[in-house]
């Protein structure tokens, strides 16, 4: 089992990947739902960090520092940095932002590694729906230092058109910001995993493929 298949089983076992009839925030009716809020234990966050590290290693993304946007990205970046050291022997930095700059103590907007010119930064997020988080954090990062954002890693790419575009959020991020987004897995990987018996859910395959045909994009 490769790391993608292992991650899909991990999502299913953790309750982060569910099948059924769901109304998404977009208003679309989907036969599957991804809720990363269901990762709640130390073991789960440790394993999740390892999958982020695997994705970065397997895609050969250059990185000096992992950045986790507040708030969901904070534990993800920290666990991924720990996994890098424990699994690959690479001691990468990590940092995260505050919602508001601190005006006392050490001050500043960032906690952890203070960014420097030319630093290779990978942004760590859970999911990407509209690109809002990227739009918010990029100016903060660039204001701190002339860093090089070498990529953004998310758990799942739904490969789904935005409400106002024929492109997915991942495609839009590259077009608008020049940032390549690397998912640990895509919805196509999940469909293949169901077909191959890695996880259950074969009774939802037809609905998933119909949903992909209606709203999906191909890369």
Image (spheres, rainbow, N blue to C red):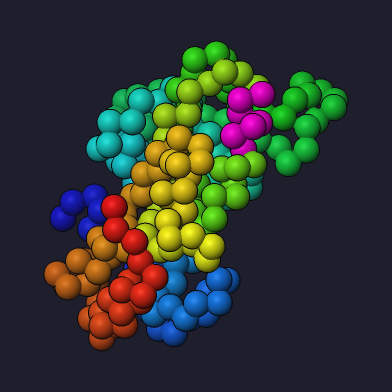
Residue 192's quadrant in the figure?
A: bottom left
Residue at (34%, 61%) from the top-left corner?
Answer: 217
Q: Is residue 179 magenta?
A: no
Q: Position of residue 53 (x, y in %)?
A: 35, 38
Q: Is residue 176 left or right of residue 89?
A: right
Foreground pick, 49 / 157 = 157
Q: Name which residue lies at 43% across and 41% down.
A: 174
> Magenta-highlighted stretch: main secondary structure?
helix
Residue 37 position (above or below residue 70)? below
Q: Position of residue 147 (x, y in %)?
A: 53, 21
Residue 18 visible in the snapshot = no
Q: Residue at x 40, y 26 (%)?
A: 63
Residue at horizontal 33 percent and vertical 71 percent from the top: 212
- Say above or below: 142 vs 168: above
Where residue 157 appears, as percent x and y from the top left, is: 38, 56
Q: Find the residue positioned furthest to the right.
A: 104
Magenta segment boundaries in residue numbering: 137-143
Q: Quadrant of residue 167?
A: bottom left
Q: Quadrant of the N terminus?
A: bottom left
For the question of whether residue 172 can be seen, the reply is yes
Q: Is residue 61 above or below residue 136?
A: above
Residue closer to the observer: 213 or 118: 213
Whole-percent x, y for residue 125 in the image: 50, 47
Q: From the viewer's perspective, is 171 left or right of 147?
A: left
- Relative horizontal placement of residue 91, taking residue 4 as reference (left or right): right
Position of residue 92 relative to residue 11, above or below, is above
Q: Residue extending furthest top?
A: 117
């Amino acid at each position: 089992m490769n790391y993608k298949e292992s991650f899909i089983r991990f999502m299913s076992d953790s309750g982060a990947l569910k099948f059924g009839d769901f109304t998404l925030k977009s208003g679309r009716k989907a036969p599957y739902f991804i809720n990363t809020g269901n990762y709640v234990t130390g073991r789960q966050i440790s394993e999740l960090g390892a999958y982020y590290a695997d994705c970065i290693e397997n895609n050969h993304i250059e990185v000096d520092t992992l950045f986790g946007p507040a708030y969901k990205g904070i534990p993800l970046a920290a666990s991924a940095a720990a996994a890098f050291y424990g699994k690959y022997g690479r001691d990468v930095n990590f940092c995260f932002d505050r919602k508001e700059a601190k005006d006392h103590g050490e001050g500043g907007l960032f906690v952890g590694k203070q960014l420097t010119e030319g630093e290779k930064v990978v942004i760590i997020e859970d999911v990407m729906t509209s690109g809002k988080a990227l739009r918010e954090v990029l100016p903060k990062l660039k204001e701190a230092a002339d860093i090089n954002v070498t990529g953004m890693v998310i758990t799942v790419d739904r490969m789904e058109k935005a409400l106002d575009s024929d492109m997915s959020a991942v495609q839009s991020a590259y077009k608008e910001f020049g940032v390549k987004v690397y998912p640990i897995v895509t919805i196509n990987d999940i469909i293949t995993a169901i077909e191959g018996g890695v996880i259950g859910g074969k009774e939802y395959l037809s609905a998933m493929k119909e949903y992909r045909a209606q709203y999906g994009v191909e890369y």
